[in-house]
Structure formats: C-alpha cells, structure tokens
Image (cartoon, grey):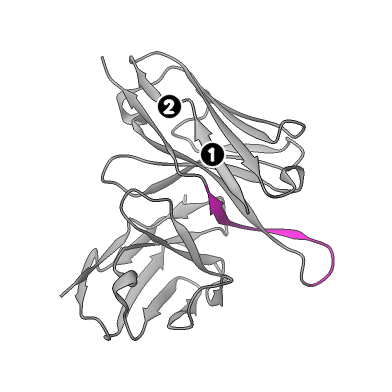
Amino acid sequence: DIQMTQSPSTLSASVGGRVTITCRASQYIIKWLAWYQQKPGKAPKLLIYETSTLENGVPSRFSGNGSGTEFTLTITSLQPDDFATYYCQQYAYLYTFGQGTKLEIK
Amino acid sequence: EVQLVESGGGLVQPGGSLRLSCAASGFTFSSYEMYWVRQAPGKGLEWISYISSVGSPIYYADSVRGRFTISRDNVKNSLFLHMNSLRAEDTAVYFCARAKLDCSGGPCYSLVVFDSWGQGTLVTVSS
C-alpha cells in the first residue's frame, strides 16, 4: 500500500499570510496527487488534482507543485475562509489520503 | 445542481448489519464511477470502496473486504453499501463521492478524484 505523510499536522498563520503544506508518498506516484479542504462537520472539497490543476471555482491563491514522491500545497493571501483541514490523496494505485493538516488562525 | 444524499446510518451492535444508501441527482449518474469514503470521529479520511459506472469492476479496502458490499442502481440513481459483521472500528461518518469526469479533450474519462460528496451519514457500532 502507498502511505501518504503530511507535514505539519497543525499550522498557525495570519490572515493575509502564506503557508505551504507538504505531502510525501511512500512510493513514486508520478503526478497523481489531489488536495482537499474540509471544514468541521462538512464534506471535503476538491481543490487541486494532477498535482497542480485547480478545480473549477477554486481561487488562484491555491497552488500545487511537486512530482514523484514529494508534493506541496501553497496558499497565499490567506482569507478567513481558508482556515480548515487539508488532505492530500494519491490515486496512482488505489486511493490513500494523508492524515491531514489543520490550518489555524494565529 | 449535483446532489448526493446519504441515508441509513445509525447505532448498531457489534456483529450487526446496516445498509447505507446514496441518492444522486443533478447529473447523469450512470456515467460516473462512485466511491464510499469514511471518516472516524476526529480522524482522517479513508477510502473503502469503488464501483465503476456500469457496476463492475468493484474494489474494496483491506479493512472492509469480505464484510462490505458496494452496489448501484442506475435506474434509481442510487448507490448502496451493505455492511455486515460490523466492528467498533467501523464507527465513522460515511460519505458517498463521485469521481470527476473530464470531457474536455474528446471522449470522457474518469480522473479518479472526488469532485462531489454527500453530507455523510454516521454509523456507530457499539453495544
């Protein structure tokens, strides 16, 4: 099975700031990596797929990068609505999620 | 508007059974691969089952294989998850999710990421 490890587990940042979340795969997954945002009590929302392709309607302050086994999600100009938990997901072989990164307001 | 609405969750004793349903609307259900994903209280997301648009192939995570059965009814636009031999560790919110379809470059193909989700239904396994 492919394991996905996100870091950090928790992140504090200010409105207007910039953050980067890292996701590492235990095996080579080429570019088959997606990112989701989840707010408490809600379903996850797809943000990015194929490492860097923004889902329709997702603001351009979200961006994804990486290849192989190391990937990043960067959010610039943080808005109050961005404070949530973020999950990466590989889909190179079946489907595995990272453990999540909680983004908190500083 | 795309809608996925789960139902059927509740409290069940260990060893018991439950059947979850997911009613789909606002899109051509029969064209989409579908998934079940669960989330234990305070924990992360876990994919548990996949079904193709036509009902086969089907895949399961190791944690549920042999106990859970996924199915769909493309006439009634519904997805199902039959859960048997339930354990305490199956306690979670169960989401149905739709695979994203890319039709931009010609024939449509599934991107195997989840672009629409239901609100979830809570399954609690406890005596």
Q: Is residue B30 magenta?
A: no
Residue B70, position as x, y percentages in the image: 60, 30
Q: Nearer the viewer, residue A54 or A70?
A: A54
Q: Locate residue B23 relative to residue A9 in the image: left or right.
A: right
Tag 2 subunit: B
Q: Are marks 1 and 2 on the same chain?
A: yes
Q: Residues within 10 Å of mark 2 (few under 14, many from 20)?
A: some
In the image, residue A63 sits, relative to residue A83, either above or below, namely below
Q: Secondary structure at mark 2?
A: loop
Residue appearing at x 43%, y 51% in the figure? A43
Residue appearing at x 34%, y 49% in the figure? B44
Residue B46, position as x, y percentages in the image: 42, 45
Report the mark closest to the observer, 1 or 2.
Answer: 1
Residue B9's label in the rendered image is: 2
Give the magenta part as a residue range: B105-117
| Chief SS of the magenta region | strand
Residue B29, position as x, y percentages in the image: 71, 44
